[in-house]
Image (tube, rainbow, N blue to C red):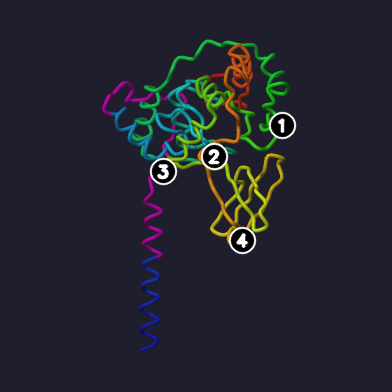
Amino acid sequence: MRTGKFWMRATLAAALIGGFTFHLSAQPPAPVIADNARNPFAGDQQAITKGAVLFRQECMYCHGVSARGGMRGPDLTTGSWNHGGTDADLARTITDGVPGTDMPPHTFKTDEMWQIVSYLRTVQQPAAPPTGDRALGEALFFGTARCSTCHIVNGRGGRLGPELSTAGSARSRAYLVESIRQPSKQLTQNRAFGGDALKYDTVTAVTADGRTVVGVPMNEDTFTVQVMDMSERVHSLDKKTLKSLRHENRSLMPAYDASRLSDADLDNVVAYLQSLRSPATPAKGGSHDN
């Protein structure tokens, strides 16, 4: 009887494993993108609509609503892509991902991949004409505007805010301006869509002995929270010992209004930030945008 039960269990396990193996082998192979491939659905309104739905289902959490960028993924409306801007380049980036970044490979069907490309073409915006002086902006960033006290650029600067070494290839000019003038606005909007927006909200913790720790959360789980304060000291706190712990939908970064940063200086700082781009990865046969 015990032998029979063992046989039945072994048979069931083999069937499950076999079924699982069959399921894996049934996954469609990744489409091969020819260097001169063109989108067969270019301008097809039905394909564009399907692509928009797929984008919102699979891509919005990193790239934001309407592809305008999130805390994890870059703005895709600028028409300036470091990994190539042809139809084939975009399709290859979607399919293969970008090694060394948060962009993973995807297993979309061939038609779905081209539908997403069709949608992305519709949200492209003409590049804004450059304004401001890059050199003056760099001097402000590391000087009187004090941006570098919180932000790192190419290994230089503070750690309290997000790194900006590739800000120009990740964000549009409008996004950068808004982030400087109204730093809490994008934080609040992105919080609803997941991603890393929570990393830069403001946390206030009051310890058992009455100390108040204000900063940004570096890591958090059910039992503990690690907070970096304004002096870049990291505090590891046991939640059950705290008197209170509060997350706020606001940034520690002050709003740089015109009294703090003139419009001319703002243009200069943004010109500098727009010049900061990730290294271009050669794409197969495609032209490159900056």
Q: Quadrant of the C terminus?
A: top right
**x and y, in percent, of residue 185 in the image:** 49, 31
State the image coordinates of residue 258 (x, y, percent, origin top left).
Answer: 58, 17
The amino acid type of the residue labelled 3 equals Pro
How far apart marks 3 and 4 lie (CA) works out to 52 Å
Tag 4: residue type?
Answer: Thr
Which residue, given by chain and number where applicable, does mark 2 sit on?
102
Q: Label 4 vs label 2: CA separation?
A: 35 Å
Residue 241: numbered disc: 4
Q: Secondary structure at mark 4?
A: helix
Q: Residues within 10 Å of mark 1 (few under 14, many from 20)?
A: some
Mark 1 → mark 2, Cα distance in angstroms: 23 Å
The residue tagged 1 is 157
Q: Quadrant of the N terminus?
A: bottom left
Figure check: 190 above or below 135: below
Mark 1 or mark 2, which is nearer to you? 1
What's the CA distance linking mark 1 and mark 3? Answer: 44 Å
